[in-house]
Amino acid sequence: MPSINAKPFPFHVDFDHIALLCIDMQRDFCLPGGFAESLGNDLSNVQACIPVIAKLQAAFRKAGLPVIHTKECHKPDLSDLPSAKRNRGNPKIKIGDMGPMGRILIDGEVGSDFVPENAPIEGELVISKPGKDAFYATELRDYLTTRLISGLVITGVTTEVCVQTTMRVANDRGYDCVLVEDGTDSYFPEFKDVTLRALTAQGGIVGWTCQSQALLDLLESEYSSPATPDFNLQSAGMEATVS
Ligand code: C5J
Protein backbone atom coordinates (compact mmCIF):
# COMPACT_ATOMS: atom_id res chain seq x y z
CA MET A 1 0.00 0.00 0.00
CA PRO A 2 1.41 3.46 -0.86
CA SER A 3 2.20 5.91 1.89
CA ILE A 4 2.86 9.63 2.17
CA ASN A 5 5.11 11.71 4.34
CA ALA A 6 3.11 12.63 7.43
CA LYS A 7 3.44 13.38 11.12
CA PRO A 8 4.22 11.60 13.35
CA PHE A 9 5.08 8.89 10.78
CA PRO A 10 4.08 7.92 7.23
CA PHE A 11 0.37 7.54 6.52
CA HIS A 12 -0.70 4.51 4.45
CA VAL A 13 -3.19 5.54 1.80
CA ASP A 14 -5.69 2.80 1.06
CA PHE A 15 -7.35 4.19 -2.05
CA ASP A 16 -10.08 1.53 -1.96
CA HIS A 17 -11.32 2.73 1.40
CA ILE A 18 -10.66 6.45 1.67
CA ALA A 19 -12.69 9.66 1.38
CA LEU A 20 -12.00 13.38 1.45
CA LEU A 21 -13.97 15.11 4.20
CA CYS A 22 -14.41 18.89 3.78
CA ILE A 23 -15.67 20.46 6.95
CA ASP A 24 -17.82 23.60 7.00
CA MET A 25 -16.35 25.51 4.05
CA GLN A 26 -19.30 27.87 4.32
CA ARG A 27 -19.71 31.55 3.63
CA ASP A 28 -20.84 32.00 7.25
CA PHE A 29 -17.36 30.96 8.41
CA CYS A 30 -15.20 32.35 5.63
CA LEU A 31 -16.77 35.46 4.12
CA PRO A 32 -17.75 38.93 5.34
CA GLY A 33 -21.29 39.31 6.66
CA GLY A 34 -21.50 35.81 8.13
CA PHE A 35 -21.61 34.19 11.55
CA ALA A 36 -17.86 34.25 12.14
CA GLU A 37 -17.53 37.93 11.43
CA SER A 38 -20.44 38.67 13.77
CA LEU A 39 -18.35 37.05 16.52
CA GLY A 40 -15.49 39.45 15.77
CA ASN A 41 -13.17 36.98 14.02
CA ASP A 42 -10.45 37.91 11.52
CA LEU A 43 -11.61 36.16 8.35
CA SER A 44 -8.31 36.61 6.53
CA ASN A 45 -6.90 33.82 8.70
CA VAL A 46 -9.28 31.19 7.31
CA GLN A 47 -9.09 31.90 3.60
CA ALA A 48 -5.70 30.37 2.70
CA CYS A 49 -7.09 26.85 2.85
CA ILE A 50 -9.80 27.51 0.24
CA PRO A 51 -7.63 27.00 -2.90
CA VAL A 52 -5.82 24.08 -1.27
CA ILE A 53 -9.10 22.30 -0.60
CA ALA A 54 -10.24 23.07 -4.15
CA LYS A 55 -7.13 21.31 -5.51
CA LEU A 56 -7.70 18.26 -3.31
CA GLN A 57 -11.36 18.11 -4.31
CA ALA A 58 -10.38 18.20 -7.99
CA ALA A 59 -7.79 15.44 -7.49
CA PHE A 60 -10.19 13.17 -5.57
CA ARG A 61 -12.88 13.71 -8.19
CA LYS A 62 -10.48 12.92 -11.01
CA ALA A 63 -9.56 9.71 -9.21
CA GLY A 64 -13.23 8.83 -8.70
CA LEU A 65 -12.81 8.90 -4.91
CA PRO A 66 -15.57 10.13 -2.57
CA VAL A 67 -15.71 13.78 -1.51
CA ILE A 68 -17.93 14.54 1.47
CA HIS A 69 -19.02 18.03 2.57
CA THR A 70 -20.39 19.13 5.91
CA LYS A 71 -22.06 22.38 6.82
CA GLU A 72 -22.81 23.53 10.32
CA CYS A 73 -26.36 24.85 10.24
CA HIS A 74 -29.76 24.62 11.84
CA LYS A 75 -33.34 24.07 10.81
CA PRO A 76 -35.31 27.25 10.06
CA ASP A 77 -37.55 26.61 13.11
CA LEU A 78 -34.40 26.35 15.30
CA SER A 79 -35.68 23.07 16.79
CA ASP A 80 -32.15 21.63 16.62
CA LEU A 81 -30.50 24.66 18.24
CA PRO A 82 -29.97 24.46 22.00
CA SER A 83 -30.40 27.82 23.71
CA ALA A 84 -26.92 27.38 25.20
CA LYS A 85 -25.51 27.53 21.66
CA ARG A 86 -27.74 30.39 20.51
CA ASN A 87 -26.79 32.56 23.45
CA ARG A 88 -23.08 31.72 23.49
CA GLY A 89 -20.53 34.43 22.71
CA ASN A 90 -22.86 37.42 22.98
CA PRO A 91 -22.61 38.12 19.25
CA LYS A 92 -24.16 41.21 17.66
CA ILE A 93 -26.46 38.90 15.75
CA LYS A 94 -27.34 35.39 16.85
CA ILE A 95 -27.88 32.14 14.98
CA GLY A 96 -31.25 32.42 13.23
CA ASP A 97 -31.21 36.24 13.05
CA MET A 98 -31.23 37.98 9.68
CA GLY A 99 -27.78 38.98 8.43
CA PRO A 100 -26.37 40.30 5.17
CA MET A 101 -26.36 36.76 3.68
CA GLY A 102 -29.75 35.66 5.02
CA ARG A 103 -30.50 34.09 8.39
CA ILE A 104 -27.28 33.25 10.21
CA LEU A 105 -26.28 29.54 10.08
CA ILE A 106 -29.71 28.44 8.84
CA ASP A 107 -29.86 25.61 6.33
CA GLY A 108 -30.82 26.81 2.88
CA GLU A 109 -29.70 30.44 3.41
CA VAL A 110 -26.94 31.93 1.26
CA GLY A 111 -24.63 32.34 4.25
CA SER A 112 -24.82 28.71 5.28
CA ASP A 113 -24.01 27.57 1.75
CA PHE A 114 -20.47 26.70 0.63
CA VAL A 115 -17.88 29.15 -0.64
CA PRO A 116 -18.08 28.73 -4.42
CA GLU A 117 -14.51 27.40 -4.74
CA ASN A 118 -15.27 24.45 -2.47
CA ALA A 119 -18.89 23.75 -3.41
CA PRO A 120 -20.04 20.15 -3.88
CA ILE A 121 -20.77 18.74 -7.31
CA GLU A 122 -23.69 16.51 -8.17
CA GLY A 123 -23.58 13.14 -6.48
CA GLU A 124 -21.41 14.18 -3.50
CA LEU A 125 -22.69 13.73 0.02
CA VAL A 126 -23.63 16.99 1.76
CA ILE A 127 -24.24 16.73 5.47
CA SER A 128 -26.08 19.39 7.44
CA LYS A 129 -24.86 19.11 11.01
CA PRO A 130 -26.21 20.92 14.05
CA GLY A 131 -23.08 20.35 16.13
CA LYS A 132 -19.32 20.53 15.87
CA ASP A 133 -18.99 16.75 15.51
CA ALA A 134 -19.89 15.65 11.96
CA PHE A 135 -21.14 12.28 13.28
CA TYR A 136 -23.63 13.76 15.76
CA ALA A 137 -27.23 13.59 14.43
CA THR A 138 -26.06 12.98 10.85
CA GLU A 139 -25.91 10.19 8.28
CA LEU A 140 -22.10 10.24 8.08
CA ARG A 141 -21.50 6.94 9.91
CA ASP A 142 -24.00 5.06 7.70
CA TYR A 143 -22.50 6.51 4.53
CA LEU A 144 -18.96 5.48 5.48
CA THR A 145 -20.03 2.04 6.63
CA THR A 146 -22.00 1.33 3.46
CA ARG A 147 -19.01 2.26 1.30
CA LEU A 148 -16.47 0.43 3.48
CA ILE A 149 -14.55 3.64 4.05
CA SER A 150 -12.02 3.32 6.85
CA GLY A 151 -9.72 6.29 6.19
CA LEU A 152 -10.47 9.99 6.12
CA VAL A 153 -8.48 12.83 4.64
CA ILE A 154 -9.75 15.77 6.66
CA THR A 155 -9.84 19.43 5.63
CA GLY A 156 -11.86 22.51 6.56
CA VAL A 157 -12.52 25.12 9.18
CA THR A 158 -11.96 25.75 11.94
CA THR A 159 -9.02 23.60 12.97
CA GLU A 160 -9.61 23.61 16.72
CA VAL A 161 -13.41 23.53 16.64
CA CYS A 162 -15.34 21.43 14.08
CA VAL A 163 -12.27 19.90 12.44
CA GLN A 164 -10.62 18.77 15.64
CA THR A 165 -13.91 17.61 17.19
CA THR A 166 -14.76 15.53 14.14
CA MET A 167 -11.29 14.03 13.89
CA ARG A 168 -11.33 12.98 17.54
CA VAL A 169 -14.75 11.35 17.20
CA ALA A 170 -13.74 9.66 13.93
CA ASN A 171 -10.61 8.32 15.61
CA ASP A 172 -12.67 6.89 18.47
CA ARG A 173 -14.91 5.21 15.90
CA GLY A 174 -11.96 3.46 14.30
CA TYR A 175 -11.18 5.62 11.26
CA ASP A 176 -7.59 6.38 10.28
CA CYS A 177 -7.57 10.15 9.91
CA VAL A 178 -5.01 12.42 8.29
CA LEU A 179 -5.57 16.15 8.66
CA VAL A 180 -4.19 18.26 5.84
CA GLU A 181 -2.10 21.00 7.47
CA ASP A 182 -2.48 23.58 4.70
CA GLY A 183 -6.07 22.46 4.08
CA THR A 184 -7.34 23.66 7.44
CA ASP A 185 -7.39 27.07 9.12
CA SER A 186 -8.38 28.86 12.28
CA TYR A 187 -9.15 32.48 13.10
CA PHE A 188 -6.35 32.03 15.63
CA PRO A 189 -3.13 30.77 13.99
CA GLU A 190 -1.71 29.78 17.37
CA PHE A 191 -4.76 27.54 18.01
CA LYS A 192 -4.21 25.86 14.65
CA ASP A 193 -0.59 25.24 15.47
CA VAL A 194 -1.24 23.77 18.89
CA THR A 195 -4.11 21.63 17.58
CA LEU A 196 -1.92 20.06 14.89
CA ARG A 197 0.67 19.30 17.51
CA ALA A 198 -1.84 17.90 20.01
CA LEU A 199 -3.49 15.58 17.48
CA THR A 200 -0.21 13.99 16.43
CA ALA A 201 1.52 13.94 19.82
CA GLN A 202 2.11 10.71 21.74
CA GLY A 203 2.65 8.66 18.60
CA GLY A 204 -0.36 10.03 16.73
CA ILE A 205 -2.84 9.77 19.56
CA VAL A 206 -5.64 11.10 17.35
CA GLY A 207 -4.09 10.60 13.91
CA TRP A 208 -1.76 12.06 11.34
CA THR A 209 -1.15 15.40 9.65
CA CYS A 210 0.33 15.94 6.20
CA GLN A 211 0.87 18.57 3.53
CA SER A 212 -1.58 18.65 0.62
CA GLN A 213 1.23 18.29 -1.91
CA ALA A 214 2.12 14.84 -0.59
CA LEU A 215 -1.41 13.65 -1.32
CA LEU A 216 -1.63 15.45 -4.64
CA ASP A 217 1.63 13.87 -5.81
CA LEU A 218 0.47 10.41 -4.82
CA LEU A 219 -2.94 10.86 -6.45
CA GLU A 220 -1.25 12.10 -9.60
CA SER A 221 1.09 9.12 -9.76
CA GLU A 222 -1.67 6.58 -9.02
CA TYR A 223 -4.41 8.03 -11.18
CA SER A 224 -2.79 9.90 -14.05
CA SER A 225 -4.28 8.38 -17.17
CA PRO A 226 -1.87 6.27 -19.21
CA ALA A 227 -1.00 7.67 -22.63
CA THR A 228 -3.54 6.59 -25.25
CA PRO A 229 -1.91 3.87 -27.38
CA ASP A 230 -1.41 4.86 -30.98
CA PHE A 231 -3.60 2.10 -32.33
CA ASN A 232 -3.90 1.95 -36.07
CA LEU A 233 -6.67 -0.29 -37.37
CA GLN A 234 -5.10 -0.77 -40.78
CA SER A 235 -1.70 -1.77 -39.48
CA ALA A 236 -3.50 -4.24 -37.22
CA GLY A 237 -5.02 -5.82 -40.30
CA MET A 238 -8.58 -4.61 -39.65
CA GLU A 239 -10.84 -2.21 -41.44
CA ALA A 240 -12.93 0.37 -39.67
CA THR A 241 -16.60 0.16 -40.49
CA VAL A 242 -18.99 3.06 -40.23
CA SER A 243 -22.60 2.24 -39.65
C1 C5J B 1 -17.26 27.00 14.64
C2 C5J B 1 -16.64 25.38 13.01
N1 C5J B 1 -16.05 27.51 14.75
N2 C5J B 1 -17.00 24.94 11.81
N3 C5J B 1 -17.56 26.05 13.74
O1 C5J B 1 -18.16 27.42 15.34
O2 C5J B 1 -15.51 25.20 13.41
Image (cartoon, helix red, strand yellow):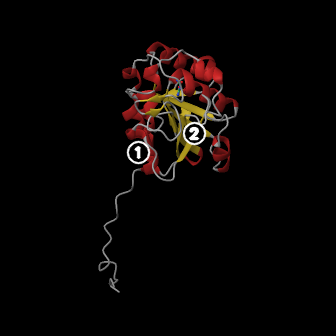
Residue drawn at point x = 56 percent, y = 27 percent: 162
Q: Is residue 31 left or right of residue 70?
A: left
Q: Secondary structure at mark 1?
A: helix
* Residue 43 place in picture, x, y as percent: 39, 22
Position of residue 39 relative to residue 34, above or below, is above
Crowd rating for badge 2 (residues with CA inside 10 Å; few <14, some 14–19, many 20+) = many
- Among numbered discs 2 and 1, the one appearing first in the sequence: 1
The front one of 5 and 28 is: 28
- Looking at the rendered structure, the kind of residue marked 1 is Ala
Residue 80 x %, y %: 65, 33
* Place of residue 62 in the rendered image (x, y in percent of width and height, measured from the top left): 43, 50
Q: Residues within 10 Å of mark 1 (few under 14, many from 20)?
A: some
Give the numbered dot on residue 58.
1
Quadrant for the C terminus, please.
bottom left
- The circle drawn on residue 201 is none
Identify the amino acid type marked 2. Answer: Ser
